[in-house]
Image (cartoon, rainbow, N blue to C red):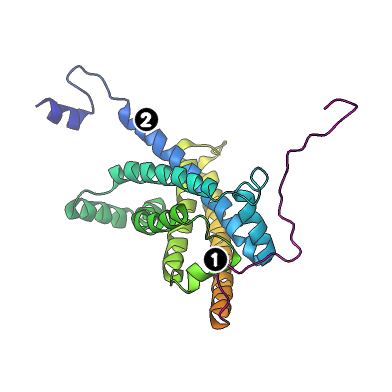
Amino acid sequence: MSDLIEGYLGKTVERKKSRLPAKLDFIQSFTGGFLALFMWAHMMLVASILVSNDFMYQVTKLLEGSFIFEGGNPLLVSIAALVIFVIFIVHAALGMRKLPGNFRQYQLIKTHSKSMNHDDTKLWFIQAFTGFAMFFLGSIHIYIIMTHPDQIGPYESSARVWEEYMWPLYILLLLAVEFHGTIGLYRLCVKWGWFDGDNPKATRKALKKVKWALTVFFLVLGFATLAAYMKIGYENSKNNIPRDSFKPSSAQIMNYELKTKSVGGIA
């Protein structure tokens, strides 16, 4: 009976409200915002292939800590991927709380959304669907990066995309990530009122325009990047060029060596 009362009133028999839902909601918002910003940064780094193979190689070595370890250490990439994977799973688990638990609940939400014809509710449906897809697609990608950190580079990444037929997965993942991430950030701004100002309604319209602009920008950037990797992978496969044969031409990889220097007579 106590559970029934709490379910209806949101209070325990002691008339106290639980703070746990609010805390979980905050964690979900924080992890979601972090992952969205991380994916934008990740996209910019991956898009370094559009500049040149050398530049992409240089970025890879930088992420491997070439300024600390000579030649870089791929273990750093594995550790970073593991951290992202944990945050990803936490966010997904918290997000599942708000999904319909059965087909009847789904029908009720869909009917309610259709009768209201509310744009933000439609965006929620898109975010829920893309989040569900990302749980599977994103897990595969992160696991590959986590277990094969030494196979990231102009040729290695291109071979994975083309020869290992990962490009269909990356197309679906790109669509899911960009729609889910931009919609998520938009909904965070609206939910927490970060930019409401004096006219929240006008702010929401402006935020929605920014959201769609960012979606289009990162989708164009993402597909251009994927096409570049596919092109390199196809050409290397056609010419029988090994995936581990890339050598930077004029690029200088940043390696900082700790040396004892005398400055003003002080060692």
**Identity of the residue drawn at 39% across and 58% down:** 140
**Identity of the residue drawn at 53% across and 57% down:** 150
User: Badge 2 is on which residue?
Assistant: 23
The secondary structure that most of the magenta stretch takes on is loop
Magenta run includes residue 132: no
Q: Amino acid at mark 1?
A: Glu
Q: Residues within 10 Å of mark 1 (few under 14, many from 20)?
A: some
Q: Please state the horizontal and vertical placement of residue 248, each as a whole percent of the image.
A: 69, 64
User: Badge 1 is on which residue?
Assistant: 156
If the image is split into quadrants, where does the C terminus sit? Answer: top right
User: What's drawn in magenta, residue-wise?
Assistant: 240-267
Q: Quadrant of residue 5?
A: top left
Q: Amino acid at mark 2?
A: Lys
What secondary structure is found at the residue carrying circle 2? helix
Tell me: 259 left or right of 103.
right
Tell me: 77 left or right of 256.
left
